[in-house]
């Protein structure tokens, strides 16, 4: 017998039922149904300023964080600064300029897709 992990079980269920479970009566008519979804999960942690020191960006610390961020499956890890920047963009239609409202300079993209405050 093959043992499946919970992720594999969910994947198999989604493939089998194509995202929808139905219940039928004795004549084959659908009487009830459920739609399968994959909710997104987010982990909001710390601040981008934690990755800088007196010499600028603390590369080892930032790389460690990026490795942690990428190692999690099914959860997106972002900092409070990144969450604020996303919300600002959604509300105002453009990115932060000169750290508008944050008391910091503007965020710049960092290697690996994140952003660092400079």
Image: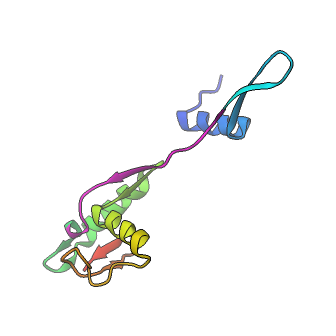
Q: Quadrant of residue 93?
A: bottom left
Kindly give the residue lying farthest to the left in the view shown.
54
Q: Nearer the viewer, residue 42 or 55?
A: 42
Q: Nearer the viewer, residue 95 or 52?
A: 95
Asked if 13 appears above or below 74 in the picture, the reply is: above
Q: Nearer the viewer, residue 23 or 104?
A: 23
Where the N terminus falls, by quadrant?
top right
Q: Viewed as shown, does residue 16 lie left or right of 66?
A: right
Kindly give the residue lying farthest to the top in the view shown.
26
Residue 113 visible (yes or no): no
Asked if 4 appears above or below 39 in the picture, the reply is: above
Q: Position of residue 49 (x, y in %)?
A: 21, 70
Kindly give the residue lying farthest to the right in the view shown.
27
Q: Nearer the viewer, residue 20 or 72?
A: 20
Q: Viewed as shown, does residue 4 lie left or right of 31?
A: left
Q: Quadrant of residue 64?
A: bottom left
Q: Quadrant of residue 12?
A: top right
Kindly give the residue lying farthest to the bottom in the view shown.
98
Q: Residue at x 86, y 18 (%)?
A: 27
The range drawn in magenta is 34-49
Q: Position of residue 13 (x, y in %)?
A: 66, 34
Q: Residue at x 27, y 84 (%)?
A: 98
Q: Position of residue 35 (x, y in %)?
A: 64, 37
Q: Position of residue 25 (x, y in %)?
A: 79, 18
Asked if 50 appears above or below 29 in the picture, the reply is: below
Q: Residue at x 29, y 81 (%)?
A: 106
Where the C terminus falls, by quadrant?
bottom left
Residue 2 visible (yes or no): yes
The colour mode here is: rainbow
Q: Viewed as shown, does residue 40 lie left or right of 36?
A: left
Q: Is residue 26 magenta?
A: no
């Amino acid at each position: 017998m093959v043992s499946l992990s919970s992720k594999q079980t969910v994947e198999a269920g989604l493939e089998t039922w194509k995202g929808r479970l139905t219940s039928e009566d004795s004549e084959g008519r659908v009487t009830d149904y459920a739609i399968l979804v994959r909710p997104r999960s987010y982990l909001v942690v710390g601040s981008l300023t934690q990755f800088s020191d007196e010499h600028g960006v603390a590369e080892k610390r930032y790389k460690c964080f990026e490795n942690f961020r990428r190692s999690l499956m099914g959860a997106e890890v972002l900092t409070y600064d990144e969450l604020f920047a996303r919300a600002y963009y959604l509300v105002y239609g453009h990115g932060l300029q000169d750290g508008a409202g944050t008391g910091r300079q503007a965020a710049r993209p960092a290697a690996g897709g994140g952003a660092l405050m400079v």
